[in-house]
Amino acid sequence: HSFFPSCLLIEEERHVRANDRNYNDKFFYADNHIKTSKYNVFTFLPINLFEQFQRVANAYFLVLLILQLIPEISSLPWVTTTVPLVMVLVITAVKDATDDYFRYKSDQQVNNRQSQVLRGVLQNEKWMNVRVGDIIKLENNQFVAADILLLSSSEPYGLCYIETAELDGETNLKVRQALTVTSELGADILKLAEFNGEVICEAPNNKLDKFKGTLYWRGSKFPLDNEKMLLRGCVLRNTDWCFGMVIFAGLQTKLMQNCGRTTLKRTSIDKLMNTLVLWIFGFLVCMGVILAIGNTIWEQEVGRSFQVYLPWERPVSNNNAVFSGFLTFWSYIIILNTVVPISLYVSVEVIRLGHSYFINWDGKMYYGQKDTPAEARTTTLNEELGQVEFIFSDKTGTLTQNIMVFNKCSINGNTYGDVYDEFGHKVEVSERTACVDFSFNPLSDRKFTFHDSSLVEAIKMEEPSVQEFFRLLALCHTVMSEEKNEGDLLYQAQSPDEGALVSAARNFGFVFRSRTPETITLYEMGTAVTYQLLAILDFNNVRKRMSVIVRNPAGQTKLYCKGADTIIFDRLDPSNEDLMDTTSEHLNEFAGEGLRTLALAYKVLDRDFFEEWMTRLLLASTVMENREQRLADLYEEIETGLLLLGATAVEDKLQEGVPETIACLTLANIKIWVLTGDKLETAMNIGYSCNMLRDDMNEVFIISGHTAAEVQQQLRSAREHILGLSRVSNTADEEKTEMFSNDSVFEETIIAEYALIVNGHSLAHALEPELEQVLLETACLCKTVICCRVTPMQKAQVVELVKTNKMAVTLAIGDGANDVSMIRTAHIGVGISGQEGMQAVLASDYSFAQFRYLQRLLLVHGRWSYFRMCNFLFYFFYKNFAFTLVHFWFGFFCGFSAQTVYDQWFITLFNIVYTSLPVLAMGLFDQDVNEANSHRYPGLYRPGQLNLLFNKRQFFLCTLQGIVTSFLLFFVPYGAFSLGVRADGLHLSDQQSFAVTIATFYFICLFYCFCLRSCYCIGLDTYYWTAVNHLFVWGSLAVYFAILLAMQSDGLFSIFPSQFPYIGTARSCLAQWSVWLVILLTTAVCVLPGMAVRFLKTDLYPTLTDKVRRLQKASRKQGPREQNLRRVRRTSSRRSGYAFSHQQGYGELITSGKNMKVVHLHLAPSDKVRALCKQVRDGLAPTSEERAPF
């Protein structure tokens, strides 16, 4: 291992010794230098050229250029291939260099950040100079430079707080705690410099939530887990300083491991083009073989008679007609090479670049609040945006804002939060609605808004139930309060739900001010009140509730409880039945609006009963066998006979326009799957808020099995139910089920709506090879799919499953590092840029600030890009076939001698000057319908999903059309000129005049086709003819005639007689009226039949696009009409579950005092119960293995 870099070996475990670079260097661990760029000054040219010539077309034209240098087979000068090839290489190289330069600048910005590294003394070092084993110091609000083991911090017990938005998109703070033995090192530089502990841990991996290792120090070993690690990309918050030891650096950090390598994404049109180019090459070879055989026969039968005038040169001079045919084959390969257009790739890149700029410049996708425009971070996937069938979305920060707002509540049977006008009619709350005045409360939060003033009046009138309601919210939580300035409170909540509830209590006069391990201090309507904290009955996913037991200054002991309404209602005193029914109705109303609900209750405890219960709790906490069940039974015992106070309704604020966007995309036949790390209840609640889940759905299937067999049974049952089949009990039935489920057409015929919700542990089994097909088939039969508790790797696996098996274009959208894997896996990755970090944006192909912009990205930019690219390709292939195949027909009249029809300069400039700009204008600016109708009729998106606008069938049609056009272009003028004469009696049929005439025919015919096609595409209306279109079309015609007359002028001939031999031909030919009549005839014969077919097809068999285009044309004549777009509202009456994103274990952390600053308390002597509480805390708090139950 000491002789070879670790990159050449599979690292099974890592050995890291603190402050010992010599020891660590022999393992060749990665340093902290980040490099995502591919080139440097010296390697750019060779590597870039090597990459470019890996493209079949570039390699083909390089071989063609070499062939043109052989005089025996080349009838065209080498410049005809060199100019287009060099242009392609240069333009691509400049684009690649520019992209790589921006990556380099980004790398440098990160690598040059400063960090304090311990080298005997603390000194500033650049991030790229940090090494594994170094001890570094972090200060408040600094980014973590590498994956480090937390050693000590400024907070008690070695705690520190971090924000992990860059990793998981969550802005709420997380707690990390150092080992007790290392936290004693504190900020003592000498002790830290002498620290020589060795860590043996897992190899680098991408698991953000797991870490296993052991610290060996002073002859002892200490277990390490993820709670002791600070990962690169986190930000230190509310902690003055901390020290850590680098475990993983640079590309081996978990953040960078999740980013992975940037894979080359290619669109379906790219893949189709590669196939078509191979077919075209095969067609070219066939034409070359036919003409070579023709040359062999002609030389054998006819050519011998002309040897006196055209003697054969060596090596054909010994009458070898077959060898002459062989040379002719290569000559025609050179002449007909334009049928494989190298300029196609340049034109495609230019069009894609233009479409990318249209996205970047779109003011309707600009988010002013964050000054964030939309950004196309790649230029290669624009048309793929018009073909998306599956969207995989994260929840937190993508669909939601990760902001909780106290919206409504029910207290003692009365609801608060709605606003009514003077007539008693309910008014919808908007930004213009007046807010409640909280000026009576000097400690209120100015950012908090509430619109129902009746609740404030109830508070001021000192209604007992209202005061008890907010007292519960101010006491029953695990929030920490920080007050740097008098009255300037900052709440640090481990979940945004808790923060919203405590902030609400604060604004309504019950201000949570501070806490110690044994007390909670409130300011109740301006009066300081301190409660003794006797116990916390912590939350877990089974209990779905949390409780606190406190004693007020009057000596009264109370239990306050909040949790899921179904759980709380089962524990209410029978006397609360009427109030429970009323509150239940209110909860249904809140849930119908998509609000997250909690029920609140309390209980006055008898002193003797509580003392006896506390004694039993202490005993249960100390036993080793079946401890958790005993504690749960005791919690259950005391949390009975509760008195209902009411319920809260918190809005998990969706991003603006999310329900409308999802509804519109669903109408476009796009399936949206939500993949979230949140728990089941939270994910379902958001599903109802977004209208992805509705009450009128036929069935919502929840897959929650813990074994593979259970998951398989649940999936099969769901599938059988959807398909309407009886229970499968024999092989024949199973075969029948397989037949139906594998039939994608059958999926389309399912009218009923179903939803599938899969839990994380069940998804792990469902993604196993033997079950993944069952999962996919069942999910694709459902209208809505939600996967919760999903790991980053599982997100990528789900995307890969659909991508591989459904052969559909997939799009993944997210906002955190935990979404990077699926963003990179999907065909298209979209990053949400906002307050949740930038890792998803850096890994994405497109980025913007709000989910609602996805609708415009797909239905407008994506659909237009696909439509334009398909039209461009159709006409590009058409014009090249029509241009090139004239040589094929001419071969039968020139003895198969590989003589060209056109002037060599016309051949050279045809694709890069004469015909490039008009077709580019079509590819950049053409529209079938405007953007308003693109939104109004989502069904217009369907042709892209079915790949109808350009496919192999369309290619054969444009090939056939090109062959027919080339036939007419050659034979109509040939027939007209074969016996024609000029006005002065001279023949029209010399080769040069014929070449100029055919070139002009073709050019004008092509532009007639283009102009008529453009008019047809917009319903015979020139609404979309921009100034650029006019400039490119008429300008190209003018440039053609200008260059034609200039190159065939006397002046250029006198200077370069061998390069410009067509002296005066253009002037002489185009001066004849018969030439212009033939031009008109040829154009009519080529264009009119095709246009007639199109018009008949539009009238007799109109598509949705045709119908919308007619409506659009009619509406323009009638003038604009006002649009009243209705907001999509949630109408479900489903009761939301325990929508409270709380984590287990915070109660123990609070009562242990480990997360609090050291304060001096002056407490009065406590009673027996108080002493018992303290004994329990002191006895159980220190070890993580024996967590305190409260």
Image (spheres, rainbow, N blue to C red):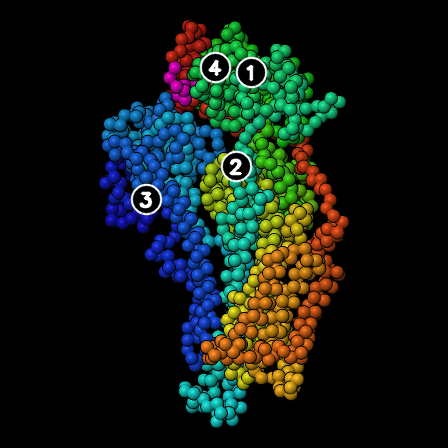
Residue 118 vertical placement versus 812 (above, below): above
Left or right of 220, for residue 830: right
Give the residue type at disc 1: Asn
Q: Position of residue 618 (x, y in %)?
A: 44, 15
Pointer 3 residue: 30
- Decide: marks 2, 3 in contact (CB < 8 A)? no
Give the residue type at disc 4: Ile
Magenta span? 1150-1159
Q: Nearer the viewer, mark 3 or mark 1?
A: 1
Residue 1094 vertical placement versus 821 (above, below): below
Lower position in the chain sequence, tag 1 or tag 2: 2
Distance CA(mark 1)–CA(mark 4): 20 Å
Instruction: Mark yes or no: residue 467 visible.
Output: yes
- Decide: marks 3, 4 in contact (CB < 8 A)? no
Lower position in the chain sequence, tag 1 or tag 4: 1
Distance CA(mark 4)–CA(mark 2): 38 Å
Pointer 4 residue: 520
Lower position in the chain sequence, tag 2 or tag 3: 3
Q: Residue at x 46, y 90 (%)?
A: 311
Based on the picture, tell me whether residue 1162 belongs to the magenta stretch. no
Pointer 2 residue: 370
Pointer 1 residue: 441
Distance CA(mark 1)–CA(mark 2): 31 Å
Left or right of 181, for residue 720: right
Secondary element at tag 2:
loop
Q: Nearer the viewer, mark 1 or mark 4?
A: 1
